[in-house]
Image (cartoon, helix red, strand yellow):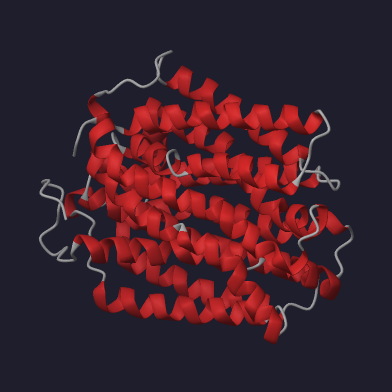
Amino acid sequence: MSDTPNTRPQASMSKWELIAILVLMTSLVALSIDMMLPALPDIAASLQPREDNHRQLVVTAFLIGFGAAQLIYGPLADRYGRKPVILGALGLYGIATLVCMLAGTFETLLAARVMQGAAAAACRVIATAIARDLTSGRRMAEIMSMAMTVFMIVPVIAPGLGQLILMVAPWRWIFVALLIFAAALTLWLIFRLPETLHEEYRRPLRPDSIARGYAEAIRNRLLLGYTLAGAAFFGGLYAFLNTAEQIFAEHYGLGESFPLAFAAVAGTMAVASYTNSRLVVRLGQRRLSHTALIVFTGISVLHTVIILSGVDSLPLFLVMLAGTMMLLGLIAANFSAIAMEQVGHIAGTASAFYGFASGVIGALIGAFIGQLYADSALPLVAGQAAMGAVTILIVLVTERGTLFAVGEDDAEG
């Protein structure tokens, strides 16, 4: 799996089992978001939110809880270890999912979704921390990219799975399916996941120690810069998640066939993630992610201009959106690897800070863009163009005006 000195003797998993565990942990997050998309109209009809666009808040509530809770899991994971924290969080996830399933009002559902997202946040923090415990540098980027390649199949099929459930049962049964998946993951982790936290890296769970850990994270230029860049970039992605069902099903009239269009877009991201896992060891995180970011922004700007000119068709939208989303696979894992490279001794805290700031800020940006939806794809496309430009600016400042460079943190690990 890795011959670096960071590898713990008891971490006896093969590389492929590590990847499988990372995939399942992160898949719980993706399933919790994407399986809900085809159910949003049914949820709105059943629980009757005040405005139609408020049904997007079922996604946003999860994302906010998901981002905010990561600040808690970082210190816990650095004190008590990765395994007990993830198992406790999965228990909380099960309770929250039951509340979602039984919710009688829209407000109750949103509150439960915040709690569900907060519980699922441990999957993201612990997965990144485990990867950093066992690997580093380009090797970490390779492992994360390979995991993301398989993981990206989940957004491809998740809306379809949700739609299949809706064909035979009410929307509440989607939460039953999530509960079963979480239970199976819990059992695998109980029997197969070793503790990967180094004893010398355990940090006391005291306010002053936690404050020092987060202060160190914030002072790290790469971590802070790429966290803010991720927040801006993922704001555009979350806007897509918020509005995908309305744009495809309503604006373009796909109705219940919307999961097919969503799968076509998400599928390109899986292809790009696999490509990244093959190229990153040779080319480095910066060359791939910076190039992809510039191309992403250029395509989004062009798409905005085309829609403003009065051309707005489903085939054009699918092609150009797929082009931009494909580039996500060349950005996400690499941004995370660059951000984490210099903070291995506080991997849990650093991962939590990265996830908190990028997640919460990104969710709020995505919610703002999503609420601008008015039977047009323009807010989404223009929002992604704007966020791409902001991300480029942040990366330029972080890298002191230089893109594509290969530094010490970009070396093979």
Q: Is residue 93 left or right of residue 254?
A: left
Q: Give the residue displayed 36% in from the left and 45% down from the top.
A: 275
Question: Can residue 155 be seen from the camera position used here?
Answer: yes
- Quadrant where the C terminus sits is top left
Q: Give the residue displayed 65% in from the left and 82% down from the top.
A: 173
Single out the residue that lies furthest toward the right.
50
Q: Where does the image place residue 96, in percent across and percent down from the top left?
A: 59, 73
Single out the residue that lies furthest toward the front.
315
Single out the residue that lies furthest toward the bottom.
168
Q: Give the residue displayed 77% in from the left and 65% down from the top.
A: 255
247 over 391 or under it: above or below: below
Question: Can residue 76 be seen from the camera position used here?
Answer: no
Q: Where does the image place residue 179, in percent across and percent down from the top left?
A: 53, 79
Q: Is residue 150 left or right of residue 137?
A: right
239 over 173 or under it: above or below: above
Q: Nearer the viewer, residue 292 or 179?
A: 292
402 over 389 or under it: above or below: above
304 over 330 or under it: above or below: above
Q: Nearer the viewer, residue 210 or 358?
A: 358
Q: Where does the image place residue 392, in percent across and percent down from the top left?
A: 52, 24
Single out the residue that lies furthest toward the top.
401
Name the quadrant containing residue 51: bottom right
Name the quadrant containing residue 335: top left
- Quadrant where the N terminus sits is bottom left
Name the quadrant containing residue 296: top right
Q: Is residue 217 left or right of residue 6?
A: right
Task: Please tell me how many numbered marks the rendered image carries.
Answer: 0
Q: Give the residue displayed 47% in from the left and 77% down from the top.
A: 181
Q: Nearer the viewer, residue 285 or 220?
A: 285
Q: Where does the image place residue 57, in percent across and percent down from the top left?
A: 73, 57
